[in-house]
Image (spheres, coloured by chain):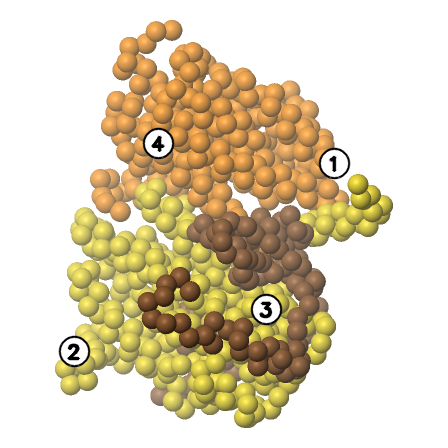
Chain colours: A orange, B brown, C yellow
Amino acid sequence: MTWSDSDKSTAVGAYALRLGDDALVLAHRMAEWIASAPELEEDVALANIGLDLLGQARMLLTYAGEVDGTGRSEDDLAYFRDEREFVNCQLVELPNGDFALTMARMLVFAAYQYELYDRLCSSSDETLAAVAAKAVKEVAYHRDHATRWVLRLGDGTAKSQQRMQAGLDTIWPYVAELFEADELVHGLVGGGIAVDPAELRDPTTDYLTTVIEQATLTVPDTSVWHTGGRRGIHTEALGYLLAEMQHLARTHPGAPW
Amino acid sequence: MTQSPGHDLSAEGGHGAVPTTGVPATSGRAVRDWPLWEVFVRARRGLSHGHVGSLHAPDAEMALRNARDVYTRRQEGVSIWVVPAAAISASSPDEKDAFFDPAGDKVYRHPTFYDVPDGVEHL
Amino acid sequence: MYGNDFTQQPIVEIAEDDADFQAILDADGRIEPRDAMPEAYRKNLIRQIAQHAHSEIIGMQPEGNWITRAPSLKRKAILMAKVQDEAGHGLYLYAAAETLGADRADLLDLLHTGRQKYSSIFNYPTLTWADMGAIGWLVDGAAIVNQVPLCRCSYGPYARAMVRVCKEESFHQRQGFEILHTLSHGTPAQKAMAQDAVDRWWWPSLMMFGPPDESSPNTERSMRWGIKRFSNDELRQRFVDMTVPQAQALDLTLPDPQLSWDAATGHWEYGAIDFTELFEVIKGNGPCNAQRMAHRRRAHEEGAWVREAALAYATKRDAEREAEPPAAVA
């Protein structure tokens, strides 16, 4: 596919927005745990992870607003888009549930992000490559953190094993969406800019299977797959999340903070 | 100004007035939690590990990771050691004299014992 | 901090008026873990450090409230980092208390059952975004006035923890001031929000220093032991003198019509404080006492199965390691 420069720029912006929205929404979910974690050390750890993700989001959103031709700032994008304009995957917007569900979702998403950023380091787009180079180290740690917990909850007590399996079962229908590709992505992959999500399926699921089995759990078996996030089709949870996140900024549009 | 009956309120600690009378230091019950670990960090090459504090973790793997989160948040660490607090042996304050006095009179071990003429550098 | 080896040897106890002990304190020396110390000194410190730690972790709640509603990504990140710091401070302080033979789980139990307390200031609600500014500027400002002298407190681990805390705390007050400055120079609605927050937080911040304590026996002893360095009123005055000019820089007023500069004393005189409010809040009748405790207890109870699972896992792995034959040396 040959694009004009401005079309390509717009496409890069749209791609960065997907990565940015993923990080933004998950950062918000992680922040909800602060002052409620099972142990003080975990409050610190989850805040760290949330801050890492928020940092990724800010870089990606800022870049997206620059190159997509709209000139929007990170805050314009975060606080003044409506539900249907968000292009995060549905997995990251799911409510936190209990600690097991949170760790199940972190395991899956960090494993996916690790493979993604690892490959994105070689993007022909300098900014995306730079963001990836920093982010891959962060998500390696997130993946490790989630792994430690999935092992401990899966192979801990009978109660924790049951909850951990339930957590995996709940989020599994949202996993397939991570590996979907569309015309936008295919075009950018062709230009060496983006990473083909389909390429990430095997390494990610291999990692997940290893951890899940070591945790004495079972990889969930589901024929139900939810998708649509990249097209702005979300779960009902996102509306509530955005209402809370955006209301103050929207009440005082244009005001400095 | 009279104090509230039954409360000595002092601005001790961080965020201000808390009761100081009638507040127990311990409940006397045994409550099970994650074991205690001591944390040592070497902030950069050329230094040795220093004790920075302690934390609770269920095992060594988690202790290391918690230590990284709690004690090296501002990039203050190149290398981290964690040791179960129960594994540490310490000299007793009572032993101070016999333990440490013999070193006290060997002053030639201290660099300040030696006179160095002015202008001689790198000594 | 040099370890928690209380299981190995008994702690040497000495009389409260032990001359050698007092000599160390009078020379501004440091008492370290497992040094001989009066039981009352040890208990006093455990209580003080524990309640200080409890205050940090309860303090995460009023500010944590606004993380999900922070109106810009930069403010969101800063607030997350600040609240995270508070968790960290709680951890450093519990660690310091444990060097005195206390156990963190025990201290938390005392908090959860209401037998140990936390600072009353956190029993006030955070009603608007501007409260984030007011807390950073006033509450953390007052805390800094309290905490800096503690960096020289007689007990080594507590003093060292405070040095660490103070270093991290320096950005907390500044970000609060900056929030208010932005608001007071923003839209009229924002300025009104800022003024409203200051109007609500000023008097409770002054009450943080406690009532005048000249008649309190505990204060005198704490000072003799190098744990408390200045009286409640001295600290409060220091805070007022520091803060009034800052309010002027913020273009906000303080809700005290009697605030006036006294050239003779070189201090800002302020109006009489009604301490009945403080006593009520300490007693448990503040706006948020029940809510703060319920939140704290709920987090702890809901986390129990997680903590137990981690211990169960560790036990299983230990058992496996015990059962393994020793590795052959090549």
The kind of residue on which mark 4 rests is: Leu
Residue C33, percent from left and from top: 59, 74
User: Quick one: B100 or B53, which is closer to the camera?
Assistant: B100
Q: Secondary structure at mark 1?
A: loop
Residue C120, percent from left and from top: 43, 70
Q: Disc 1 designates what residue?
A: A216
Please name which of the two marks, 2 or 3, marks the residue nearer to the observer. 3
The kind of residue on which mark 3 rests is: Tyr
Q: Disc 3 designates what residue?
A: C2
Question: How would you rate the neighbour count of disc 4 (Cα within 10 Å): few for under 14, some for 14-19, many for 20 or more?
Answer: many
The kind of residue on which mark 1 rests is: Thr
User: Separation of disc 1 and disc 4 at Cα?
Assistant: 39 Å
Q: Disc 4 designates what residue?
A: A61
Q: Are marks 3 and 1 on the same chain?
A: no
Q: Is residue C104 above or below residue A166?
A: below
Task: Identify the residue shown where x is 59% and y is 26%.
Answer: A204
- Please identify the quadrant where the C terminus of chain C is shown: top right
Are the residues at dot 1 and dot 4 in contact (C-beta closer than 8 Å)? no
Label 2 marks which chain's residue? C
Please name which of the two marks, 3 or 4, marks the residue nearer to the observer. 3
Q: Disc 2 designates what residue?
A: C261
